[in-house]
Image (tube, coloured by chain):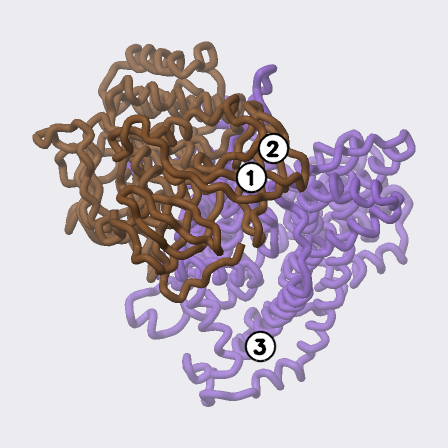
Chain colours: A purple, B brown
Amino acid sequence: MAAIVVLLLVVPPACFLIQAVSPRLFDQGKAWLTWSNVSVAFGDGIGRALLDSVAVSLGAGLLAVVCAAGLAFISERTTAPGRRLFVLALWAVLLVPSYLVAVGWEEIVLRSGLLSSMGLWSHTLQGTVLGPVGVAFVLGFKGTPFAYFALAPSMGALGGDIENSVRVHGGGRIDAIRVIAPLLLPAIMSGFVIVFAESVGDFGVATTIAASAHFPVATYTLYESISTFPANFGVAAVVGWSLIGTVALALVLQNGLMRSRSFAVVSGRSRASAPRTLSRKGNGLAVGFAAVFFGASLGVPLLGVVSSSLLIPFKGLHLSALTLSNYRGLLGVSGLSGPIRFSAEIGLVCGLATVTLGAVLARTMASSRRGIGGKVLDMALLVAVALPGVVFAAGYIFAYNLPFLAHAGIDLYGTVPLLGMAYVANAVPQSSRIMLGPFSQIHDSLLHAARVHGASWARSWRSGVLPLLARPLLWAALLAFSGLFLELPISELLAPPGVVPVSVAILSVLGKANIGQGTALSVVAVAFTLAVVGVCLGLFRLLAPPGWRHWQRPPATKEASADTSTLVTAEASGSGNVLQTDLVAVS
Amino acid sequence: MTHAQATQPTFPDHGAPESVIPAVEVADLTKTFGSKVAVDNVSLKVAPGQFVVLLGPSGSGKTTLLRCVAGIDRPSAGLLRIGGVDVDGPGTHLPPEKRDLAMVFQDYALWPHMTAEQNVSFALRRRRYNADERQSRSLLALAQVGLAGLEGRYPGQLSGGEQQRVALARALVAEPSLLLFDEPLSNLDADRREQLRVDIGAMVRRLGAAAIYITHDQAEAFALADVVGVLDRGRIVQLASPETVYRDPASEFVARFTGLAGELEGVAGEFDGSHLTVDVSGHEIYGRPMLGGPPEPGSPVRVLIRPTAAHFGGSDSPDLNGRALPAVLSNISAPSASNGSEEGHIPPSATLDAVALDSAFRGWGYDHVVELAGGRRLSGIAHSQRLRFESRTQIVLSADGCLVFATSPSATTVRL
């Protein structure tokens, strides 16, 4: 297991990153140790690109935390209508790749876009969206689910006795907020740092809005370094280090802040506060806030993409402007159904491989006796989660193109298996951390009970434990499939000649100014993903035994006591594993 | 029993003939986790049908020992035999499913995706019954633990006590020859704990299986056990009947862990053949010497006082005749011919001045805490009436419940 993790996750990025200072190690230059790549990179404007990345990521982090705090407050502390749909909608935001959100906004504000068809085009709005502000907003929207999943448990756990103790000792509502708000700091910081890290490493917005607005960000600079001829891996590695260093600095700052005092608010004796029933005006505000957020993050981009795929440009918003030619084109001469089939097949195979490997790693990390090896694995996967996909891709290009591998008979460069390996390597860290929560909640005694009552090791897992993990495993598989189906940076850099994954096809068609067909392909791709997710969840609902589906929330009976199963233990959310609790919640 | 004897315990004869194959034999078993020794060279025999309770504080190794017997943990050294079959030893480790045992877990360990009936019938699959028979036996087992009609419920729909009853039914249904209990009552409230304790004792004895039960609750241990093994830091320091453990604890640790009203330090005086005089800062009290014999006159001793040995005395003190002791302790405290006391012999007693500090209503009467001169406190002193706070009274200490241990020569005498 350790060997697989090292080969998949550690060796390729490490080989690539070391080029920043030691190009001779893999025959990329003459010096064993040099800082020339650093000076070249910063001379080429990487400093500016890095500052841009940091600036928009800080903005995205702030926006995401504000949006997430509002949504978490509404869903956890009020009875506002529709709050139960938030988690589902946030998963939709998470599933739609950032480049599609960016393309959707572009299709709204461009001269040929929907606003123009409605006679509402604004140069100012176009300039705002297609610039740093737009980049920060799209990244902030995309990051909001991460911040929400970090904030919501703490928001729900606060209040109760803490709030009551303020009130019975003479404090008013404002005093209660003053006491409670600082206790949310760890969750806020976790959410902020995760969104910041995701934004710094994002490639989808970098290659769409930022690139077309000539607003250089670090990930796109890295991509340009290795996609132009001759590829400059040394400079690209410096950019890679800069990205990693930026994320690491944010994590260190967060840790330093959190260690200075205790923020523990959840204990076995905590009593959650009852949700507040809002007035009509309050309900209106809450629903309005949620509508604005989900409209901007999901509704507007989808509307932009769908309208662009259905409308003939510059013909206004009339029935006569509607056309299905873009969709017919996908099946016709353009042959764009091929990318969907290819991405679906590789997404299925690599998704299953990701979940299998991720489950084994999650079990290893969750084991009560994981030892030092388990802790190292935990740390390695946490670091890998923060590693931008474009760095992974660059690592795979570099490592598997080394001559000595070809001499050793390992000739994977430019093949579909290498693309698959990179997909799995990039998805496994997140998948394993997502499953860490559910695996941590399974007490070893369930396995031991099966063993002492006559079940073999295999049957203990099959009968006693896997049914409890069926939902989280299914969700992790669907998330892995969706992510891989629409994955961009690795597909862009590693797809072999003649093989076109969906994301590459979409951007390629859009790049040829065939906007309608590009957006039509996007619509079909997203619809296909949602259909796969829907069918799988539907089949699970139809075919899985009742106990598999309802064990966490069995139907209440009059005699049933609140004193229920003790196997579920709370896992505090933290950087890098914020999804783990909500994976159970959403399922 | 000395400490040295305790490390190589001799299994007491409780009626099992030598020719009978022990249900469990543990020889020199050691289990380490890194540098930490959890179980240290333990030896133990459990006869068929015998109920052994391992009693000890947290971290004493009792759970680890039980998990080794279950096959969940593999011993680092030593031998383990179940029903005459070697299950652990050099090069041998029989997995849990091959040991023909059942276990009740502290956290119940019910599979939440299975109904109560499915949980119970899971244990029957190794018995090769057909589906109908598995179902009928499962329903019968659930009925026996008082859960008839609840077989279709999931664990999440049952209370804690009901869940533990399902776990008990699961353990009993396959009629294994060995039952293991890992603090099964510790998560229950007092009322349910007592009910289920009675049910466990009755059902296990009806089944005729051997049982190893671990707990840190001495009252639970004394109520259930044929034999109690007291563990301290991974070693069995005493293995004997509950009565012996209470009357003749093998060490101060055992005495403290099985219940004291308080402790006094003094100097050993004369020994009259059954009781020792102890000078506690000028006051004479009487006790029974422990650990093999009376200490030298003039040597420092520590007197550990059982709650049953202390009661109120003097003309102003309330009458004790109406007091009702908890059943377990009252049986143990009664002198009997078997422990050397003669029929009708009244052990000597001493009277000390005291001040009442606290009284707690217990239903049958009141438990008091009193302070002796010098600040030493005695607790758990029962009476049918409440004493007022700081009222003066007298405490009578009966020699049979005052256990005298020799202390090191450097021990200082407490002034009363």
Chain of the residue displaying label 1 = B
Q: Amino acid at mark 3?
A: Val
Against A400, is B366 above or below? above
- The residue indicated by pointer 2 is B316
Residue A406: image location, x then y, percent:
33, 69
Residue A140: image location, x then y, percent:
74, 54
Please give the name of the residue rendered at 54% of the width and 66% of the height, measured from the top-left corner.
A391
Instruction: From the viewer's perspective, tell me whether residue B290 is left or right of residue A266.
Output: left
Residue A547: image location, x then y, percent:
48, 24
Question: Along the line of sight, which residue is nearer the eye, A100 or B261?
Answer: B261
Disc 2 is placed on an element classified as: loop
**Label 3 CA crowd tier, 10 Å (few <14, some 14–19, many 20+):** many
Question: Along the line of sight, which residue is nearer the eye, A530 or B189?
Answer: B189
- The residue indicated by pointer 3 is A238
Residue B394: image tag: 1
Q: Amino acid at mark 1?
A: Gln
- Does residue B309 appear in this view? yes
Alpha-carbon span between mark 2 and mark 1: 8 Å
Alpha-carbon span between mark 2 and mark 3: 91 Å
- For the image, the number of numbered tags is 3
Q: Are marks 2 and 1 in contact (CB under 8 Å)?
A: yes
Please give the name of the residue rendered at 90% of the width and 58% of the height, measured from the top-left corner.
A124
Mark 3 vs mark 1, foreground winner is 1
Quadrant in the rendering for residue B124: top left
Instruction: From the viewer's perspective, tell me whether residue B311 is left or right of residue A130.
Output: left
Question: Along the line of sight, which residue is nearer the eye, A245 or A257?
Answer: A257
**Label 1 CA crowd tier, 10 Å (few <14, some 14–19, many 20+):** many
Instruction: From the viewer's perspective, tell me whether residue A41 is left or right of residue B156.
Output: right
Please give the name of the residue rendered at 55% of the width and 23% of the height, measured from the top-left corner.
B364
Q: Amino acid at mark 2?
A: Asp
Disc 1 is placed on an element classified as: strand
